[in-house]
Image (spheres, grey):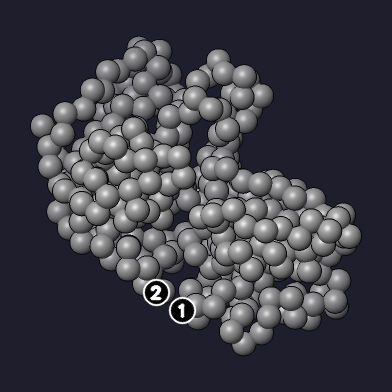
């Protein structure tokens, strides 16, 4: 039996064998996992044992940001073959659900998502996955980049929800991994300029190295003054809230131009107040983001075309044997770390 990275309970990880029931259906593929990124949600289950209503009540394999190689295909699979390099979309909806039929399968109440209790994740040697949610990587896209498609997909969803128009000026609050992904997706989506605000200078230095992105350290200058300077006092066409911080949410209306949009990407741990009248007074459009739907092909196309380079956001790659230490490092939340990735044995 292969070994997996198992969250035994809150605060306790182990590398051990765990029995997995992985039946292959006719529409499934079996994949040898190559690279898995560590996500904030994985770390949160490790440190807190729960996210909202999802509680770790039994040992669970972590990980949902993965790439790998197809080793076996079901009888009805036509677009993949053994040996194909792929990345996987970790949420599996019910294809006949009402949400799926509407194209919003990310909010299908029946969706099964890797490493969301009680569903096992992908930090294990092989996974069985629907071919429909498995995407072939072009030669130009590495396994490491393939495992970055999942977090980038959230940025893509945010950019799509914003309905960016060419030449928009956007502001992103929060320079965590998702803020960075959102800023890059907004640029690729047509923004002329994206201002990213945070108080951690190392994070701003990383994202500020990309052309088209300007950074604002809110210790030195309030986000509102920075966007006013950049837009002659008009405001941002789109404000992406990626910090989840209550004061940032409350201050959103002041950052957007009249008739602009605010996109809520970050997830506050507790309910936070919103300035409704502030939103109304500028007739702002409010959009929310939950994971993503129908963006993987576009994300991979942007990476393959060289329009998006996610490699600078991969801070370190560690061997599977050192996965527990990697999780402890991720839990430290170093300001110089964006994404830590784990390379599986034999990969
Ligand atoms: Zn993730």
Please tell me the numbered disc located at residue 69: none
**Is residue 38 visible to the viewer in this orientation of the structure?**
no
**Is residue 247 visible to the viewer in this orientation of the structure?**
yes
- Residue 212's image quarter? bottom right
Please tell me the numbered disc located at residue 336: 2
**What is the tally of numbered marks visible in this picture?**
2
Given residues 177 and 225, the one toward you in this image is 225
Residue at 78% across / 63% down in the picture?
Answer: 253
Q: Secondary structure at mark 1?
A: helix
**Cβ–Cβ under 8 Å for marks 2 and 1:** yes
Q: Locate residue 62, reporting x and y percent.
A: 30, 44
230, above or below 7, in the image: below
Q: Locate residue 311, reporting x and y percent.
A: 42, 61
The quadrant in which the N terminus is found is top left
Residue at 59% across / 81% down in the picture?
Answer: 217
Q: Check disc 1 and report the residue beneath it.
A: 202
Q: Secondary structure at mark 2?
A: loop
Q: Locate residue 87, reporting x and y percent.
A: 40, 40
Left or right: where 299 falls relative to 232:
left
Left or right: where 301 falls relative to 85:
right
- Residue 307's image quarter? bottom right
Q: Locate residue 6, reporting x and y percent.
A: 21, 43
88, above or below 224, in the image: above
How far apart are the two marked residues, 2 and 1, measured between alpha carbons? 6 Å
Given residues 273 and 42, the one toward you in this image is 273
């Amino acid at each position: 039996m292969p070994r997996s990275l198992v969250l035994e309970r809150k605060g306790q990880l182990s590398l051990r064998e765990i029995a997995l029931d992985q039946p292959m259906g006719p529409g499934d593929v079996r994949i040898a996992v190559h690279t898995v990124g560590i996500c904030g949600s994985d770390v949160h289950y490790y440190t807190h044992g729960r996210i909202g209503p999802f509680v770790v009540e039994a040992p669970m394999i972590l990980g949902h940001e993965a790439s790998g190689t197809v080793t076996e295909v079901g009888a009805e699979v036509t677009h993949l073959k053994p040996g194909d390099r792929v990345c996987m979309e970790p949420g599996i909806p019910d294809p006949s659900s009402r949400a799926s039929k509407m194209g919003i399968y990310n909010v299908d109440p029946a969706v099964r998502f890797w490493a969301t209790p009680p569903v096992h994740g992908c930090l294990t040697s092989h996974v069985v996955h629907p071919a429909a949610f498995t995407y072939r990587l072009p030669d130009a896209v590495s396994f490491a980049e393939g495992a970055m498609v999942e977090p980038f997909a959230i940025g893509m969803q945010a950019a799509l929800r914003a309905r960016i128009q060419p030449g928009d000026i956007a502001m992103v609050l929060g320079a965590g991994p998702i803020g960075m992904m959102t800023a890059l997706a907004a640029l690729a989506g047509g923004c002329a300029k994206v201002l990213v605000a945070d108080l951690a200078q190392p994070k701003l230095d990383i994202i500020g190295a990309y052309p088209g992105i300007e950074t604002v350290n809110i210790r030195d200058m309030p986000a509102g003054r920075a966007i006013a300077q950049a837009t002659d006092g008009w405001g941002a066409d789109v404000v992406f809230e990626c910090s989840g911080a209550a004061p940032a949410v409350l201050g959103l209306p002041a950052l957007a131009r009249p008739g602009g949009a605010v996109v809520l990407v970050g997830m506050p741990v507790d309910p936070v107040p919103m300035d409704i009248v502030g939103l109304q007074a500028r007739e702002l459009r409010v959009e929310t983001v939950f994971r993503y739907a129908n963006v993987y092909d576009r994300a991979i196309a942007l990476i393959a075309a060289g329009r998006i380079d996610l490699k600078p956001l991969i801070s370190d790659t560690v061997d599977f044997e050192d996965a527990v230490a990697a999780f402890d490092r991720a839990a430290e939340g170093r300001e110089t770390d964006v994404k830590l990735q784990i390379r599986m044995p034999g990969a």
